Image (cartoon, rainbow, N blue to C red):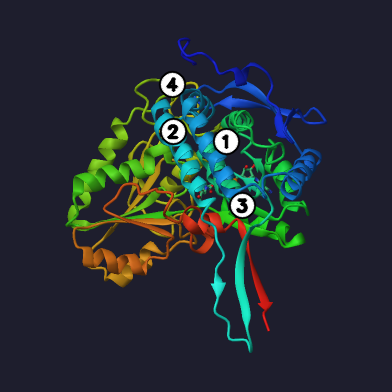
Amino acid sequence: MINPAVALPALLSQPLKMLIDGKWLASQNGACMDVINPSNGQVLVQESLGGAYEVDLAVQAARRAFEFGPWSRMRPSERSRMLLKLADELEQNGDELALLETLNTGKPLKLARAFDIGMAAECLRYNAGWATKLNGETRNVSLPGDWHAYTLREPVGVVGLIVPWNVPLAMAVSKIAPALAAGCTVVLKPAELTPLTALRLGELIQACGLPPGVVNIVTGLGHEAGQAIVDHPGVDKISFTGSTLVGKLILGSAAGNLKRVALELGGKSPVFIFADADLDRAIDAAARGIFGNTGQVCAAGSRLFVHRTVADRVIDGIVQRARQLRVAPGLSPDSEIGPVISARQRERVMGYINSGRAEGAEVAAGGQVVEGEGFFVQPTVLVNTHPRMKVVREEIFGPVLSTQLFDGDSLEELATRGNATDYGLSASIWTRDLRLAHQLVRRLRAGNVRVNAAMALDFAMPFGGYKQSGWGRENGREGVEAYTELKSVAIDLN
Ligand code: NAD
């Protein structure tokens, strides 16, 4: 239920349209679908379902804005200023954006306001700084005679940005910000389940005065609108965040015009807790790491490896937290854990929990849906799991932790157990022995490793996966350079 004291955002007062070439359009064939509030299953509004036609309009608009419009030729400081202005707009409208995010995802309002909206504004500011710092360099060549040789860093062109539903606004901005900083123009497709904040962002982009066609937003289904973006010959690069399954499909389709492809995909990340760790902090972080955002986090620590001598204390601690966490609609003031995103996702998560049971795992906490309206699942801890179980091998993307013990394993063996997954996104290590931590860090096949830290998300730090967790990195210099091409220029001065 929406708290009657909270005014409904104006965005929800009429069916949603798409932002194409600076205009708001419904889909040409009238196709639309309901946007659902996962806290109660009720319809919030209807969104337009774009397809190949709308994607083509959007790509053409982005192409015009790139080739002839002011964006790619605008002075870098001007682009930077626009991104900073957009960050301010986001913050000024932060309460409304957080409310939209909470209505659409069910996540606690406080979390949406502090984390999702805060991160999005921060991301814009970080990348705004890069707009003026993307440089080529002179090269000291050994060709005979006199040469002036240098590189130019140029925007890659029109980019298609496809994002998932777990952190909708922050994901959209994490791609839009570096793309715009680099001088690209974009076609964004939000996840069909969560279009609200992306569309409100579109309004704010217009309010900031970004030229038409620089940012286009096409809502729609993955296999229609998403596929049309991936197939379109006018798109120079795809940046995709989502499942490994769809990432592989995208790779195949992008072959058509050899688009550049960046992929941020799934994870099944290990958490190692050694006997000498600060156990209170480790327990707290492990619980937050798997139950936060209802486990719908690509880097969630979903496989716990704990030393046998402290296993009882650690697992009991996490079980206690799982039981105490307030599972409630995001608009409830005391909500700590919201619903999963959809009825389908709830079934999927329950399917995994039940497969764990069937394969011999024991449910130490949770393990059930929360009866009543909305798509709630109890925070769940599974013990007696082993590496062959489906719950241990596959990404669940829900609040489900599997636990395994270690004792007497060499560092090599422990790393092998941690690496025994197709994924390689993230890992965390809890120990006071920094020598051991460094040694394990080097043996883990993961793009992001934390030591004694619950979270370490910073836009200066590249983020991305080894193995089937993806291609490329977001954030940092690498993240913005990923939206550029490098041109080598050699001038014969002889
Ligand atoms: P998904 O792959 O089903 O969908 C992601 C996006 O791709 C959506 O916008 C969807 O409409 C679109 N899509 C679906 N099929 C498509 C197709 N054939 N062509 C083009 N686009 C298509 O993923 P999801 O269920 O929305 O999100 C959950 C997944 O995302 C998890 O696997 C999670 O690990 C991953 N994820 C990864 C990161 C990361 O940074 N590595 C971050 C968040 C989520």
Rounded to the nearest angstrom, the CA distance separating label 3 from label 2 is: 31 Å
- Residue 481, quarter of the rendered image: bottom right
Rounded to the nearest angstrom, the CA distance separating label 2 from label 4 is: 17 Å
Residue type, numbered disc 2: Val
Rounded to the nearest angstrom, the CA distance separating label 4 from label 1 is: 22 Å
Is residue 294 visible to the viewer in this orientation of the structure?
A: yes
- Crowding at mark 4 (Cα within 10 Å: few <14, some 14-19, many 20+): many
Residue type, numbered disc 4: Leu
Q: Residue at x 39, y 32 (%)?
A: 114
SS at circle 2: loop
User: Quick one: 195 or 97, which is closer to the camera?
Assistant: 97
What percent of the width, then of the height, locates residue 103?
52, 24
- Do callouts 4 and 1 mark residues in contact (Cβ within 8 Å)? no
Q: Residue at x 38, y 39 (%)?
A: 291
Residue 239, numbered label: 3
Q: Name the front one of labels 4 and 1.
A: 4
- Do callouts 2 and 4 mark residues in contact (Cβ within 8 Å)? no
Residue type, numbered disc 1: Arg
Rounded to the nearest angstrom, the CA distance separating label 3 from label 4 is: 32 Å
Which image quadrant: the C terminus? bottom right
- Crowding at mark 3 (Cα within 10 Å: few <14, some 14-19, many 20+): many
Residue 377, numbered label: 2
For mark 4, what is the residue? 331
Label 4 within 8 A of ligand 1 by Cβ: no
- Crowding at mark 1 (Cα within 10 Å: few <14, some 14-19, many 20+): few
